Image: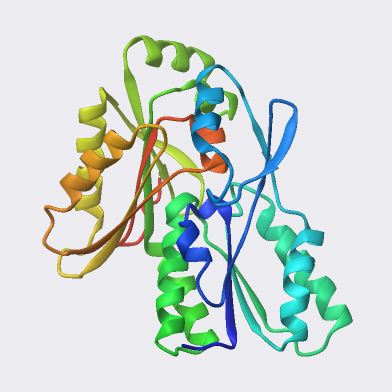
Amino acid sequence: MNKNIVLIIDSASTVTLDFIKQENVIGIGINCSYKGKDVIDDFGEEFNRKEFYKALKSGEMPTTSQINSFRFEEVFKPLVKEGKSIIYISLGGALSGTVDSARMAVENIKEEYANVDISVIDSMSASLGEGLLGYYAYEMMKQGKTKDEIVDFLEEAKTRTHAFFTVNDLSHLKRGGRISSSAAVVGSLLNVKPILYINHEGRIVSYSKTRGTKKAIATLVEKFKDNINPDEKITVAISYGDNYEDGKLLEEAIRKFDNVEKIITNEEGTIITSHTGPDMVGLFFMGKLREKI
């Protein structure tokens, strides 16, 4: 284990609570406002996700806000004083200004301290697309890899990290400007399930549309098959909201692929479901280069 490296990741990554409690890993929560109060996503440690899902289903429309540079400085500075090398993996810059706040914090710290060794990685993704990078980085830390080796890997790997997902409630995507109001109304009436994708620029785009949950999951599996390198052993990540059964259906389908070595699953927290709604399923994996759509 390279104990001089500290891995930091934010709560938009959907990594498990067990992951951030490991040695030399720090989780930093993103703020969410709903029902007139501000909460920090704590990776599921104390915050009741089921109550949050219930609020979403009752029509609550929460908002999220990026982590500011001051919070990053509070996390980074003590580690810099200890002489640690830091890798921070961020929610994609096309989706949030969080990565810019982290970079600003690094510049501020460099004005105060010498020999600052902090690398900020824009995951160009979200949820377990970001989280997968964290899992791989930690495995490399355990293997004793250097910080430069890990950073080089992450910068290359993120271009091959795919994120597909589908949602049940289109109103949250409408509010975020991902689909039009008319499309949301028609889609809800016709049981349309959009397949969304985080493209090569780190932006969420509409990939295709299906009708019904089973067809949506079948489409996710099809896109998985199209984008993997079949001869490579891979780790796959699956996320879900208040629809565990749908996540399980997807997991069972993915397990049928011989080259799938490991599947990581986790329930989504407040940050992602604030934008997707409470019922969503996400599929994340490394394979070919991300599609340019």
The location of residue 181, given as percent across then percent down, is 53, 15
Residue located 47% across and 64% down the image: 19
The location of residue 2, given as percent across then percent down, is 51, 89
Residue located 49% across and 33% down the image: 50
Vertical arrangement, residue 13 with respect to residue 205, above or below: below
Res 101 seen here? yes
- Quadrant in the rendering for residue 3: bottom right
Residue furthest right as drawn: 112
Residue furthest front as drawn: 46
Residue located 71% across and 79% down the image: 79
Horizontally, residue 236 falls left or right of residue 79, namely left
Residue located 51% across and 28% down the image: 173
The location of residue 176, given as percent across then percent down, is 58, 30
Horizontally, residue 77 falls left or right of residue 96, namely right
Vertical arrangement, residue 145 with respect to residue 47, above or below: below
User: In which quadrant is the C terminus drawn?
Assistant: top left
Vertical arrangement, residue 238 with respect to residue 63, above or below: below
Q: How is the image coloured?
A: rainbow
Horizontally, residue 17 falls left or right of residue 213, namely right
Q: Nearer the viewer, residue 81 or 147?
A: 81
Numbered-mark total: 0
Horizontally, residue 66 falls left or right of residue 230, namely right
- Quadrant in the rendering for residue 89: bottom right
Q: Nearer the viewer, residue 272 or 19?
A: 19
Res 178 seen here? no
Vertical arrangement, residue 184 with respect to residue 75, above or below: above
